[in-house]
Image (spheres, coloured by chain):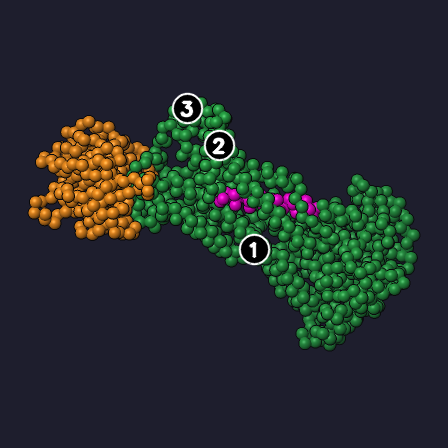
Chain colours: A green, B orange
């Protein structure tokens, strides 16, 4: 028995060797599935572990509470709040920097340094240089990304306008902070590290500059383990309200953490969405290969059974073969996943500034990969193995009856569709195995879908940028004031030589509420018929702030669960802190729009203030730009400047750096699927048809005419799959877009018509290349054997 | 040289002339000599039966005559053209225009009806018969729209004959056409071949193990060990329907 068993093993190995080229095609598809899975699972694990360790080691706060000014003595009360494990006060402000190498003014957020104690919160990671010496008030450390991007050497001096005062600062160190893993400046969608900085300086000089001696304007809090935070938040808001508290918010709403978490969520979507596509295609391929093998080995199976081999041994034989056929894919997939993961980790470390990000695949990822590979093996092998098991020895040893094509529908349809006999052969062949044809179409459609869905983000991003920066924001510069200003500031800007046009805006921090729903985002007061900054919806239509009431973004309206005509309440967190009741008069999705937009005059009135603005959009004479920058850099009222062109450039560079690689990646993956499906499907078809095709060659058909029958079948499958693939790709992108959107931006749903066209091209190229490989086999058909053998 | 049914004065009615045809498979000690120098002349319109045991070289000769295999040495002249010098494309054209094949196992396309199996060939021919006409010739006028799976073995083989003759080939090569059929069905298939040969003057080669079939031929070639070991000329061809085995 052991001899026989080992003979069966010899057969197994020979079968495997015979199927090697098909095994390669299957392995590639499995590798794509396992690879994307290992990469995503590995990255999710690595990113989560890195984030958690980083946050933990450097005691990243769980809650943040900005305010206007409170005496240091209040900290004792805050620390006493139930659920608060630790609380640190600090001073936070904004500044503009004038750097020799950067033409535009650099916008900086400035924090007081955390205490040097290990129990301090939001501790920094010193990457270069040293911390400021308390005896040298001008010394600062800055976030490493900025130091690098701005090309600043340690010891560099910077002119700064800090709370309206001109100061000289000196860079002594480069740091990382868990608070700025993703250092996004206000008004940006990608970090612009050259033009926005985060600085930390000794608390005393900062307090002196802001008149906050023995006082603070920002609190960071660590919660006790197991503490949800809701109650702490509520009590904190009550406690800080008299001190101008702008509302405490949890880490989940902190911008950097949100982006990191969002990225992990997207990876999770990818890990759950992509691999199944590949693995199901692989299951289908394994199924057709094994089914065909069982068909051709009917007599062998019958013989083995007649000789007394147990059914179990025969089933095992084919299961082991299926496993062998997929092992290569598993190994390749793990290697591919590790390689891609390492590459992606590198990109992430550029994008998110972690002090360390080691890509490692833990045991879970391997187990998941193994399980994920077993799924197609089992799915694919099941029917074939079952057929082999069920074959009665006597039946099995009789050759299979000729295929019956006499089904009425099939006959008529093929006769109607096929202009000639070869086309009828193709059509009847496809219709006779409807399940296999449909699965092949689905597999091929998956390739097109994958391509269209993964290449559409670029077009949508371009469109978002076009909407945001060509149609909505047409200014050259946007300036934000350190504090709200009256109309004098407006005129002051107007008087700067080179500034051609000024369009003011007013932003007010607020919590917008409806029943128990709340959105923490400001109210934006805009000018009617403003030309520099316009309200533009996601379709590109320009609009205006409503003459009465408030216009909500679609996202805000959904969160608040309100529609046009409903009332919302805005609890303003600055100034007199009024609670405003406003009617929703419009709902509009715009790419970069704020949560709530209204007419500036209405907002001024509601705030019981005069003609007040928070900043302005500027149109500048290009020739005068350097002079304008010089004036803005020196202006004490200005806390931030964004140049539209520079922002656009940064976005372009970021997309180029981080997203161009994905083009090749997804093109490659789509091609793998096409090659896998076409190659196996054509090889199986060739195996089934070899005798027919050879007979036709004997009867005088030319090589091309015979190849037409075989490859025409594949061509029909590809053609039918394309519209489904394009449709599915567009729908998948529609689904994914929801995952990408944040409160900062709404990506418009848009599919560049070139993307489906390119998808068709990619699929066609992969299909043609595969057809070429198979065609060579058609050319080598053994004509003499066709005369002698029966099917 | 075997002069098959040739006129004594050697008038140019020979369709095939075969000179010293040799076929060796493999090399060295494992070489198999399938044909060891065959010479023959085949007269146009003859019905020729090749008789002999397995491995005697009948099929190899037929394959080379039909342009399916290359000779190791020697020549096959078809109307004065050296078929052995043809490249693959020329051989395809030769098969397409001049040769009809009938296989032992019919080799019909399962997904096409009887009529469509015939049309398959008439579509690529210059001056074909109507497929229905070809099928009527083999007695299948009532089975035009049946698929192979719905036909008996004998019917399938007659469809194959109709397919082979519908393009009006000059030569019909039949390798064991009745090998898979019983006597009664087999004789009907032979009758169809006989009709084609008589009505269209198609030179017909039939390979068989079955000595009885030789009675319906003009000429009988006996094969053994890669050579023609004997030949016979029937003054009167027996009617196929009268044969039995």
Q: Is residue A385 magenta?
A: no
Q: Are marks 2 and 3 on the same chain?
A: yes
Q: Which residue is mark 3?
A: A306
Chain ID, mark 2: A
CA neighbours of label 2 inside 10 A, class few (<14), some (14 to 19), many (20+): some
Residues marked 1 and 2 touching at CB (< 8 Å): no
* Distance in Å between CA atoms under marks 2 and 3: 19 Å
* Chain part drawn in magenta: A24-48
What kind of element bears circle 1? helix
First in sequence, mark 2 or 3: give its number: 2
Residues marked 3 and 1 touching at CB (< 8 Å): no
* Distance in Å between CA atoms under marks 3 and 1: 55 Å
Q: Main secondary structure of the magenta part?
A: helix
Residue A69, position as x, y percentages in the image: 87, 57
Residue positioned 73% across, 75% down in the render:
A627
Q: In which quarter of the view is residue A308 placed?
A: top left
The reply to whether residue A271 is visible in this rendering is no
User: From the viewer's perspective, is the residue at label 3 or at label 1 nearer?
Assistant: 3
What kind of element bears circle 3? helix
Q: In which quarter of the view is residue A14 placed?
A: top left
Who is closer to the viewer here, A748 or A549?
A748
Who is closer to the viewer here, A662 or B78?
B78
User: Would you place residue A739 above or below residue A130 in this image?
Assistant: above
Chain ID, mark 1: A
Who is closer to the viewer here, A779 or A375?
A779
CA neighbours of label 1 inside 10 A, class few (<14), some (14 to 19), many (20+): few
Q: Is residue A39 magenta?
A: yes
Residue positioned 19% across, 38% down in the render:
B228
Q: Which residue is mark 2?
A: A9
First in sequence, mark 1 or 2: give its number: 2
């Amino acid at each position: 028995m052991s001899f026989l068993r080992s003979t069966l093993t010899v057969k197994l190995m020979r079968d495997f060797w015979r199927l090697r080229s098909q095994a390669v095609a299957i392995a590639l598809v499995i590798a794509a599935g396992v690879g994307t899975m290992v990469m995503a699972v590995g990255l999710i694990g690595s990113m989560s572990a890195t984030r958690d360790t980083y946050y933990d080691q450097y005691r990243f706060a769980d809650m943040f509470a900005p305010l206007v000014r409170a005496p240091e003595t209040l900290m004792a009360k805050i620390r006493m709040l139930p659920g608060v494990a630790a609380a640190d006060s600090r001073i936070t402000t904004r500044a503009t920097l004038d750097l020799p190498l950067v033409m535009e003014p650099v916008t900086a957020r400035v924090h007081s340094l955390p205490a040097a104690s290990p129990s301090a919160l939001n501790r920094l990671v010193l990457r270069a240089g040293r911390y400021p010496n308390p005896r040298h008030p001008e010394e600062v450390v800055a976030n490493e990304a900025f130091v690098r991007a701005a090309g600043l050497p340690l010891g560099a001096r910077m002119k700064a306008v800090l709370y309206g005062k001109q100061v000289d600062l000196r860079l002594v160190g480069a740091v990382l902070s868990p608070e700025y893993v993703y250092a996004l400046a206000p008004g940006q969608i990608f970090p612009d590290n050259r033009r926005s900085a985060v600085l930390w300086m000794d608390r005393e000089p900062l307090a002196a500059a802001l008149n906050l001696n023995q006082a603070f304007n920002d609190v960071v809090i660590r919660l006790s383990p197991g503490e949800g935070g809701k109650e702490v938040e509520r009590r904190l808001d009550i406690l800080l309200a008299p001190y101008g508290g702008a509302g405490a918010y949890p880490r989940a709403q902190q911008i950097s953490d949100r982006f990191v978490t969002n990225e992990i969520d997207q990876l999770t979507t990818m890990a759950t969405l992509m691999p199944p596509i590949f693995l199901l295609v692989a299951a289908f391929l394994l199924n057709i290969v094994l089914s065909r093998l069982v068909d051709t080995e009917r007599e062998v199976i019958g013989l083995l059974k007649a000789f007394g081999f147990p059914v179990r041994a025969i089933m095992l034989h084919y299961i082991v073969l299926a496993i062998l056929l997929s092992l290569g894919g598993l190994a390749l997939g793990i290697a591919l996943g590790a390689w891609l993961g390492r590459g992606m980790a590198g990109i992430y470390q550029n994008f998110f500034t972690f002090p360390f990000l080691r890509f490692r695949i833990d045991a879970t990822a391997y187990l998941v990969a193994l399980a994920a590979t077993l799924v197609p093996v089992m799915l694919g092998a099941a029917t074939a193995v079952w057929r082999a098991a069920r074959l009665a020895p006597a039946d099995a040893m009789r050759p299979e009856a000729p295929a019956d094509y006499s089904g009425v529908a099939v006959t008529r349809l093929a006769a109607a569709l096929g202009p000639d006999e070869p086309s009828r052969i193709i059509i009847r062949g496809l219709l006779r195995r409807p399940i296999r044809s449909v699965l092949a179409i689905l597999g091929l459609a998956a390739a097109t879908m994958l391509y269209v869905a993964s290449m559409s983000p670029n077009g949508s991003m371009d469109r978002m940028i076009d909407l945001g920066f060509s149609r909505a924001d047409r200014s050259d510069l946007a300036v934000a004031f350190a504090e709200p200003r009256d109309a004098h500031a407006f005129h002051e800007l107007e008087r700067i030589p080179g500034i051609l046009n000024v369009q003011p805006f007013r932003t007010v921090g607020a919590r917008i509420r409806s029943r128990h729903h709340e959105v923490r985002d400001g109210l934006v007061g805009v000018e009617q018929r403003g030309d520099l900054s316009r309200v533009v919806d996601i379709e590109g239509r320009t609009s205006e702030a409503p003459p009465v009431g408030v216009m909500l973004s679609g996202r805000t309206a959904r969160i608040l669960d309100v529609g046009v005509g409903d009332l919302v309440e805005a609890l303003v967190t600055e100034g007199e802190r009024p609670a405003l009741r406003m009617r929703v008069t419009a709902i509009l999705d715009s790419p970069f729009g704020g949560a709530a937009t209204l007419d500036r005059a209405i907002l001024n009135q509601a705030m019981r203030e005069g003609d007040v603005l928070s900043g302005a959009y500027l149109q500048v004479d290009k020739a005068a730009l350097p002079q304008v920058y010089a004036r803005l850099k020196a202006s004490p009222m200005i806390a931030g400047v964004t140049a539209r062109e520079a922002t656009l450039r940064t976005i372009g560079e970021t997309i180029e750096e981080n997203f161009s690689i994905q083009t090749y990646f997804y093109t490659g993956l789509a091609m793998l699927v096409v090659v896998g499906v076409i190659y196996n499907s054509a090889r199986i078809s060739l195996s089934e048809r070899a005798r027919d095709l050879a007979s036709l060659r004997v009867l005088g058909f030319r090589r091309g005419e015979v190849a037409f029958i075989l490859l025409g079948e594949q061509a029909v499958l590809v053609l039918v799959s394309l519209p489904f693939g394009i449709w599915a790709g567009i729908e998948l992108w529609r689904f994914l877009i929801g995952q990408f959107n944040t409160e900062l931006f709404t990506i418009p749903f848009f599919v560049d018509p070139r993307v489906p066209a390119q998808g068709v091209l990619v699929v066609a190229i992969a299909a043609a290349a595969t057809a070429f490989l198979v065609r060579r086999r058609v050319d080598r058909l053994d004509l003499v054997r066709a005369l002698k053998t029966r099917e | 040289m075997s002069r098959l049914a040739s006129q004594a004065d050697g008038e140019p009615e020979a369709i095939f002339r075969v000179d010293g045809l040799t076929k060796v498979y493999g090399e060295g000690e494992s070489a198999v000599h399938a044909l060891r120098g065959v010479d023959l002349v085949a007269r146009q319109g003859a019905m020729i039966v090749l008789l002999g045991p397995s491995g005697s070289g009948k099929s190899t000769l037929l394959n080379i005559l039909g342009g399916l295999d290359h000779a190791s040495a020697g020549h096959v002249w078809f109307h004065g053209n050296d078929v052995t010098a043809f490249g693959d494309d020329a051989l395809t054209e030769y098969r397409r225009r001049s040769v009809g094949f009938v296989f032992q196992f019919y080799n019909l396309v399962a997904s096409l009806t009887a009529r469509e199996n015939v049309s398959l060939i008439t579509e690529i021919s210059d001056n074909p018969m109507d497929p229905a006409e070809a099928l009527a010739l083999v007695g299948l006028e009532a089975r035009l729209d049946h698929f192979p799976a719905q036909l008996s073995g004998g019917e399938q083989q007659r469809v194959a004959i109709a397919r082979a003759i519908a393009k009006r080939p000059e030569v019909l090569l039949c390798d064991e056409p009745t090998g898979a059929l019983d006597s009664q069905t087999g004789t009907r298939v032979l009758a169809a071949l006989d009709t084609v040969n008589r009505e269209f003057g198609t030179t017909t080669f039939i390979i068989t193990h079955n000595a009885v079939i030789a009675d319906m031929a003009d000429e009988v070639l006996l094969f053994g060990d890669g050579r023609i070991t004997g030949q016979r000329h029937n003054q009167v061809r027996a009617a196929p329907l009268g044969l039995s085995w």
